[in-house]
Amino acid sequence: MATIRDIARKSGYSVTTVSRVLNHQKYVSPAAKAAIEAVIEQLDYVPNSLARDLSFGQNKNIGVVLPHNDHPYFNQLLNGIMDAAFSSGYHIVLLPSEYNQTIELDYLEQLKRKNFTALIFASHGLALSVLEDYTRYGQIVCCENPGQHHISAVYSHREPAYLAAFNYLKIQQVTQMGLLLSRNSVQSPTWVAVTTAYQQVFSCQPDAKLMIGGMRSFEDGYHAAKHLIAQQPTLNCYFTNGDDIAAGVRQYHLDHQLAPPLLIGQEKQLSSLLLKIPTIDHHFFTLGQKAFAVALSNHHQICRFESEFILC
């Protein structure tokens, strides 16, 4: 592949003069311009747009770090980001991580090398302190409450909606409950928010034997119900991290001639509307739109959206 130095050598002009022609700058004689353009065409030279953008400080790539994309949270968030990006002239680059800290650190190093204008972390395996350390190299937006860390953030305030949902279940006189979560880990802000709200309402910690992480789909909900019913045949209430997951739980009960359980879903999916399952709307699409806007900003910002418990 031809380089700018090849053009300079073949045309007989300096690299600086060739660069001026390539970047449509002034101070190049018509004769020099014609000669250089003839060599460019002869060599079929194609400019390196990334290198050119970096030289002018015009990188147009926004990286979105996703652990996976098979949960409505990430789908809705990404849809909001893409919607905001369409008319902006910026490119959205998906960066899969599976919560692998080594991979996430590599993305941060790419931000340091100016491969990205900004990074949006939909979720992360690295500590917030590590993300904070890299904010010196470019805008970083996390999608959770950063607490004392100086990181721009756009997040849903989930706790009041969780409290409303658990209080609703308490009024229904629920005494035992399956908790189906995305990550069954103290490192997960969602896990912490759910278990904290549960303890406030029921004055005890949830039963660890009735908690399952890794829930992403209808099939996951179906198999989780099978597992929990085997342990606790009388279990008839589930708090889930997605409406489709709740629908899977419901279907297992129906398929095995069990009474439909009391369910709470999340994300306001079509399944909650069709099956009339109470749900929690975290407004992730709008959150994604705002995350993109903050990513383009050079200023530290904290934006909070209020989650909403919806009784169908």
Image (cartoon, grey):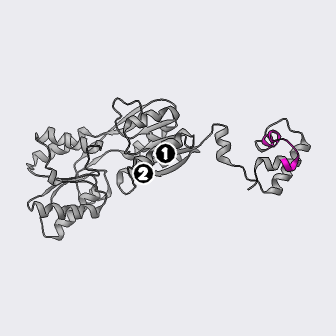
Query: Is residue 238 or residue 2 the one in the foreground?
Result: 2
Amino acid type at circle 2 is Ser
Kindly give the residue lying farthest to the front in the view shown: 102
Tell me, yes or no, whether the highlighted magenta stretch contains residue 70.
Answer: no
Badge 2 element: loop
Q: Is residue 15 left or right of 188 when viewed as pictured?
A: right
Say which residue label 1 marks. Answer: 107
196, above or below 211, in the image: above
Q: Measured from the top left, where is residue 215 in percent x and y?
A: 28, 56
Cβ atoms under marks 1 and 2 closer than 8 Å:
yes
24, above or below 249, in the image: above
Q: Measured from the top left, where is residue 34 in percent x and y?
A: 88, 47
Say which residue label 2 marks. Answer: 97
Taking the spot 26% from the left edge, 58% from the top edge, the residue there is: 245
- Give the number of callouts: 2
- Residue stretch rendered in magenta on the structure: 9-21
Earlier along the polypeptide chain: callout 1 or callout 2?
2
